[in-house]
Amino acid sequence: MSPRHQSLRAAERGYVTAETAMVLPTLVGLGLALVLIVVAAAAQLRCSDAAWEAARGLARGEPPSYAAQAVQRFGPAGASTEVSTADGSVLVQVSARLPIGNALLPAIHVLGHAQIDCEPGSPCAGDGIGQEVH
C-alpha cells in the first residue's frame, strides 16, 4: 500500500465506533417503543375480550357478579368494570391503567367495551345501571 492510502485508513479509524455510538441509543429507543406498543395493544385486546365475555354472560341472565369474575379472568391486572343496562341491552366497559416505565413515561389507559342485546326473559344484570366493579 502506498503511504497515501495508509494515512487515509489511519484517518478513518474510529468512524465505525463513533457512528455506532450515535445510532445505538436510537435503535434501543425504537425497540422500547415497539415493545410498548405491543404491550398496550395486548392489554387493549384483553379489555375487549373481558368486556365481551362479561356482556355475553350478563345478557344470558348471569348475576351481576359475573362481570367482575369475567374481568378478573380475562382482563389485565387491576382492570375496572362499568356495567349499564338500558333499552333491552347490556353495555360493559373495561378499563385498565398500564403503569409502564417510571416518571419519564406517562401511564397508558386502555379501554374495551361490548354491548349485547339481552335474551328474552333474562334479568339482564338486574338494576346494574352505573355499577362499577373493581
Image (cartoon, helix red, strand yellow):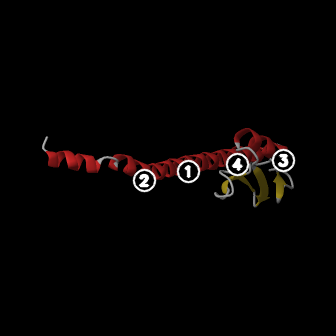
Query: How far is the residue under mark 3 from the one under mark 4?
Result: 13 Å
> Are the residues tagged 3 and 2 within 8 Å (C-beta)?
no
Q: Please, what is the three-letter code of the amino acid marked with disc 3?
A: Pro
Pointer 1 local density, CA inside 10 Å: few below 14, some 14–19, many at least 20:
few
Q: Which mark is residue 132?
A: none
Q: Nearer the viewer, mark 2 or mark 1?
A: 2
Judging by the rendered image, the residue that carries numbered circle 1 is 37
Task: Give whichever of discs 1 and 4 has the lower sequence position.
Answer: 1
Q: Please, what is the three-letter code of the amino acid marked with disc 4?
A: Ala
Query: How far is the residue under mark 2 from the one under mark 1?
Result: 24 Å
Task: Give whichever of discs 3 and 2 has the lower sequence position.
Answer: 2
Q: SS class of the residue under badge 4?
A: helix
Q: Please, what is the three-letter code of the amino acid marked with disc 1?
A: Ile
Task: Give whichever of discs 4 and 2 has the lower sequence position.
Answer: 2
Q: From the top left corner, tell me how far across and down residue 96 is, in percent.
A: 71, 52
User: In the rendered view, does 123 fall on the left or right side of 57?
Assistant: right
Q: Nearer the viewer, mark 1 or mark 4?
A: 1
Q: Nearer the viewer, mark 4 or mark 2?
A: 2
Q: From the top left corner, tell me how far across and down residue 45 is, in percent.
A: 61, 47
Q: SS class of the residue under badge 2?
A: helix
Q: Which mark is residue 22?
A: 2
Task: Count how many numbered circles sit on residues in the image.
Answer: 4
Judging by the rendered image, the residue that carries numbered circle 3 is 64
Task: Give whichever of discs 2 and 1 has the lower sequence position.
Answer: 2
Task: Give whichever of discs 1 and 3 has the lower sequence position.
Answer: 1
Q: Please, what is the three-letter code of the amino acid marked with disc 2?
A: Met
Q: Nearer the viewer, residue 65 or 2?
A: 2
> Are the residues tagged 1 and 4 within 8 Å (C-beta)?
no
Judging by the rendered image, the residue that carries numbered circle 4 is 51
Query: How far is the residue under mark 3 from the one under mark 2?
Result: 56 Å
The extreme top residue here reads 73
